């Protein structure tokens, strides 16, 4: 039950968000502004029209809209604006640290300089850190449908941009028909470069996609991973290996990955001992925020303060920060949560 005290705890609780797409966090007004400035035609002309686009019957429709919206982001300054607006919103929600994905192929295919995009994004996040203290780092999320050959080109840019705050490497995009195994060599090279490894898997494809990600790619985190619930041996392996599932409940409903809140396996995965975190994925596209996702976790799955705190701590431990910085973040989160719980009596 979402009591007044528990709701205040959620609002004020220090948070860590690990599964969040920069392009999917763009505000409708910003999207319209950028489209106008950059001469990009959108299938909507006002905020109401943009919001109407964000209604999906399945994952395929979501991807189509996502790709159409990304066309409005053209210059490094555009990325800086998106990053700054997103970072300030995260700071207002008491997010202490976040890792935000850029979808490289959405921009490379349009002739954009990916390094320029990363530079702009980093500048926006750096300004947020100066103004609020909230830290945001970057991950590159290669669309698996574009294949491993192009992934090597993206990885080369990621290596060059590590000093700008690129800490993670991932594959996302269309899961059906594009298994993880062909990307094994790319992931090995990303690991050798010092990048943290994650993959979208087990969202709309079942356990084989997850097994491939953890065995062939060696990821420490999975985006979604909810279909792991279909294989008891896989659930046991995730728990034993400490692989973290970055779960995005509202996203799963909006894309049709699950049919209803009652059918969502988050509670089952948590109770089975799998480390899970709560995330917003594409907050604009899915009409949510990280704060709202925690509220929904209480309302639909019955989580209490102990379990919410556990998930935040799991997120802090699963970041791709260097060990000393990760330890400092964990200590900060622990201290703030303990103090807040004492204050509120939750």
Image: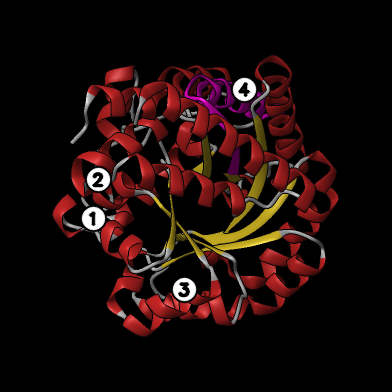
Q: Which of marks 4 and 1 is nearer the N terminus?
A: 4
Residue on which the image places disc 4 = 84
Rendering coords of residue 258 (x, y %):
22, 58
Q: Do residues under tags 1 and 2 come within 8 Å of each other at their CB atoms?
A: yes
Instruction: State the residue position of label 1.
Output: 256
Tag in front: 3 or 4: 3
The front one of 51 and 8 is: 8
The quarter in which the N terminus is drawn is top left
Instruction: Using the numbered discs, state the Cα–Cα distance from disc 4 to disc 1 in whole angstroms.
Output: 31 Å
Measuring 42% from the left and 30% from the top, which residue is drawn there?
A: 341
Quadrant in which the C terminus appears: top left
Q: Where is residue 26 in the image (x, y as percent from the top left)?
A: 48, 29
> Looking at the image, which residue is at 50% across and 42% down?
20
Classify 115 as above or below 242: above
Residue tagged by mark 2? Answer: 56
Q: Image quarter for residue 56?
A: top left
What is the CA distance from the residue labelled 3 to the residue labelled 1?
A: 24 Å
What residue does disc 3 label? 238
| Mark 4 crowdedness (10 Å alpha carbons): few <14, some 14-19, many ≥20 | many
Looking at the rendering, the stretch of residues picked out in magenta corresponds to 75-100
Q: Main secondary structure of the magenta part?
A: helix
Tell which tag, 1 or 2, sits nearer the viewer: 1
Q: Which of marks 3 and 1 is in front?
A: 3
Query: Is label 3 in a helix, a strand or a loop?
Result: helix
* Cβ–Cβ under 8 Å for marks 3 and 4: no
Q: In which quarter of the image is residue 283?
A: top left
């Amino acid at each position: 039950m979402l009591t007044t005290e528990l709701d205040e705890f959620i609002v004020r609780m220090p948070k860590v968000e690990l599964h969040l797409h920069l392009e999917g966090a763009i505000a409708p007004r910003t999207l319209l502004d950028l489209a106008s400035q950059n001469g990009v035609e959108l299938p909507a002309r006002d905020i109401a029209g943009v919001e109407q686009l964000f209604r999906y019957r399945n994952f395929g429709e979501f991807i189509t809209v996502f790709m159409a919206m990304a066309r409005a982001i053209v210059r490094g300054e555009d990325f800086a604006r998106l990053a700054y607006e997103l970072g300030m919103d995260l700071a207002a929600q008491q997010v202490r640290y976040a890792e935000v994905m850029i979808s490289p192929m959405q921009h490379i295919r349009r002739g954009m300089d990916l390094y320029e995009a990363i530079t702009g994004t980093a500048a926006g996040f750096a300004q947020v850190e100066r103004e609020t203290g909230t830290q945001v780092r970057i991950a590159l999320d290669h669309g698996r449908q574009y294949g491993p050959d192009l992934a090597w080109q993206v990885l080369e840019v990621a290596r060059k941009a590590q000093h700008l705050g690129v800490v993670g490497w991932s594959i996302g995009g269309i899961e059906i028909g594009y298994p993880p195994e062909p990307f094994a060599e790319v992931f090995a090279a990303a690991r050798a470069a010092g990048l943290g490894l994650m993959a979208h898997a087990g969202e709309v494809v079942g356990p084989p996609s997850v097994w491939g990600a953890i065995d062939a790619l060696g990821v420490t985190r999975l985006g979604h991973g909810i279909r792991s619930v279909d294989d008891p041996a896989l659930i046991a392996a995730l728990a034993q290996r400490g692989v973290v599932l970055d779960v995005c409940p509202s996203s799963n409903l909006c894309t049709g990955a699950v049919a209803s809140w009652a059918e969502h396996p988050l509670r089952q995965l948590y109770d089975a001992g799998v480390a899970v975190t709560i995330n917003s994925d594409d907050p604009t596209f899915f009409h949510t925020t990280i704060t709202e996702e925690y509220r929904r976790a209480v309302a639909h799955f019955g989580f209490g303060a102990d379990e919410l705190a556990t998930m935040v701590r799991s997120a802090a431990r699963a970041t791709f920060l260097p060990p000393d910085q990760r330890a400092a973040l964990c200590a900060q989160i622990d201290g703030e949560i303990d103090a807040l719980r004492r204050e509120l009596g939750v």
